[in-house]
Amino acid sequence: MTTPLSPRLAEDGRTLGHALIEAKLVTPAELRLALDKQKAGDPRRLGRILLEEGILDEDGLAMALSVHLNLPYIDLKRHTVQPEALRLVPEEMARQNGLIPLDFVDGSLALVMEDPTDIQVMQEISALTGRTLYPTVGVGPDIRSAIDLYYKSNRAIEREVAQFAGLPEAVLVGAEASAPEAVAQDPIVRAVDLLLEQAVRDRASDIHFEPDREAMQVRFRVDGVLHRALTLPKVSHAAVLSRIKVLAGMNIAERRRPQDGQFAMDVGGEETSFRVATSETTWGEMAVLRILGRSESILDLASLGLHDESLAAFRRMIHSPYGMVMVSGPTGSGKTTSLYAAVNQLDRTRLNVMTIEDPVEYNFPGIHQIQVNRAAEITFASGLRGIMRLDPDVIMVGEVRDGETAEAAIQAALTGHLVLSSIHANEAAGALYRLAHLGIERYLLVSAVLGVVAQRLVRRVCSRCAHAAEPSPEEKEAYMAEMGEPLASIQVGEGCAYCNHTGFQGRTGVFEAMALTPTLRRLLIEGAGVGEIESEAVREGMITMRRDAMMKVKAGVTTPGEVMRNVHTLG
C-alpha cells in the first residue's frame, strides 16, 4: 500500500465542485454561491462554506472528499484508535485541525482528517512525528467525538503525579494552607481534578482508588461494570487519598478507621456532587467516590423502562392518599432514582412533601428534604418522627434499614400519610417478608402496604453498533424457559467509539409491580410463602422482572447475557 504525504487528486482533474454536482449533493446554483463567496475574499475552503451555509451536511462532504481525492473513508464508530499512534500527535494539534491519528499502515501514520487537502498541517505533523503520513477522510463530528474519547487525561495525570510523588503530606498541607490561586496550581489538586473530570466525561457512577502491592489502581464503574482507567505509582497513593479527604472534610491523619464524607465541585461547567467512603485494606487505604450529577434531570416514571401495565400499577400506588409504597432491589439497582421519579410526579403545590435521606442526592423545588446526621442524632427513625410533627402529606424515607425505621414508617402510613421508601429485597413479594423480619406484624403489613415495585438495571445494547447475532445455547434456553418460544436472533453491540467499545451504552430498568389485592392480603395473613404470593400475583396479571427483562431482549434493548447476569432470580 502506498504511503503518500498528500492526497491524490482525481485522475481526470475534476474539481471538488464538479464531484459534488455529479453526486447530486449540491446544485450548480448552490456551488456558484459558494464560489462567489471565495472570489469576494472569503478565506474558507469550499467544503466549509457549503457546510456553514447549510447547503451540504458533514456526511455528504466526507463521502465526496473520499471519492474526489481517492482516499479511504473511515467510519470512526467502527474503528479503534491505536494508543501508539495517538501518542505521536498532541491533543491540541488534533483538536485545532480536526484530525486524529488512527494506526500505522506499512510504517506510515494513518490520519483521519476532516480536511485532507490541508497540506501545511500534514507537513507539520510529518515533521513532528518523523513519519510519512497516510491521510484518510472522516466526518467532522465523529473526529471530534473520537478526540474527546481517546485523548483522555491519563498522561496529564501521570505528569502531575510525578511532581508530588514522595512528598504527599507536606505538599498537601502546604497547598491547602496557601491562597486559592496557589492551591489551583498545586500538582495534587490538578491531578485529582483531572481524574474527576475524566470520570464524569466517561459517564462513570463510581471511582475506585484501590492500592495493591506495587501500585494504585483507579477504576471507573460505567453502566454498572468496573473498568480499569489508570494505574498510578504506589508513592502517589497517600497524596491522592489525602487530597480527596480534604475535599470531603475528612480527617487526613486517620487511616485505619472507615470514614465518610462528601463534596461538590464544578466539573465541565456542571455542578457535580461526590460522596466519599474510605476504609483500610491489606495494601493501604481504599477510597470509593459515588458521582451524583446535580444538573442531571430527574427522569419521570415513563422514562424508567416500566412496562405499560407495571407503570399504571405504580402510578395508582403513588396517587393514593395514604399507605406505604416500597421500591425493592439490591444496592445499585436504581431504587433511589425510581423514588425520585415518583416524588417528581406529585402535586407539590397542594401537598406538603418531605423526605429523610442519606444522603440528599438531588434537590427538588417545593420539597423539604432532611439529611441523616448521626452526629446530631438524626437517623431515619428519629427524622421520620420529627417529620410527623410538621404536617406532611407525603413522606419519602430513603431506606428502611432496621425495625425502628420500619415501625415508624408503618405508623405514618396507618395515620393518613403516603409513605414512599426503599428496602433491600430480591423480589416484590420478598420485600413484604423483609418487613416482617424487621418485626412488623402481618396484620399491620396488610393494613399499611399498598404495593411493592422490585427492580434491577440492565445495560442497553449500543444503538450505533448493534447488529443481529445468534444467541448461545444457554441464552436460548433461558429465553425459552421464560417466554415459551424460541429465540432465533438477538441484538448485540459490536463495540464502537460511541460506547467505548463495550457494545453497551446506558442502562434501563426491569421491573415487577405488585399491588396488594384482597387475595394477596388474605394469603399474607394466612402465612403464605414468597413463592405462593408471587404465583398469585402473576395469576392476577403481574409481569415479573424475568419476563419484563426477556421482553426487552425480544425488543432488542438488551441481551440474554445481561439479563442472566443481573436478574439472578432467573430460573
Image: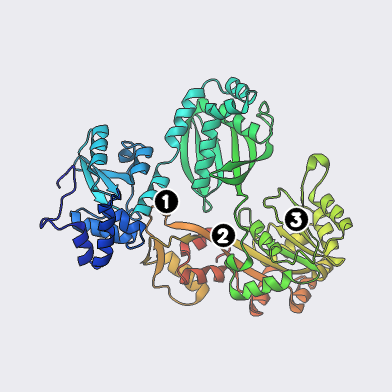
Q: Amino acid at mark 3?
A: Val
The amino acid type of the residue labelled 1 equals: Asn
Q: Nearer the viewer, mark 3 or mark 1?
A: 1
Q: Which mark is residue 426?
A: none
In this view, the residue in front, 393 or 551, is 393
Spatial CA span between label 3 and label 1:
37 Å
In the rendered image, which quarter contains the C terminus? bottom right
- Label 2: how many Cα within 10 Å (few below 14, some 14–19, many 20+): many
User: Taking 34 as reference, is 479 left or right?
Assistant: right
Q: Residue at x 50, y 36 (%)?
A: 217
* Mark drawn on residue 457: 2
Whole-percent x, y for residue 291 in the image? 59, 46
- Gap in angstroms between the C-alphas marked 1 and 2: 19 Å
Number of numbered discs visible in the structure rendering? 3
Looking at the image, is mark 2 or mark 3 earlier in the sequence?
Answer: 3
Q: Label 3: which residue?
A: 400
The residue to which callout 1 is attached is 500
Q: Is residue 315 left or right of residue 22?
A: right
The location of residue 35, given as percent across then percent down, is: 25, 57
What secondary structure is marked by label 2?
strand
Chosen colour scheme: rainbow
Q: Are marks 1 and 2 in contact (CB under 8 Å)?
A: no
Q: Is residue 345 above or below residue 3?
A: below
Q: CA distance from mark 2 to mark 3?
A: 21 Å
**Residue 568, quarter of picture:** bottom right
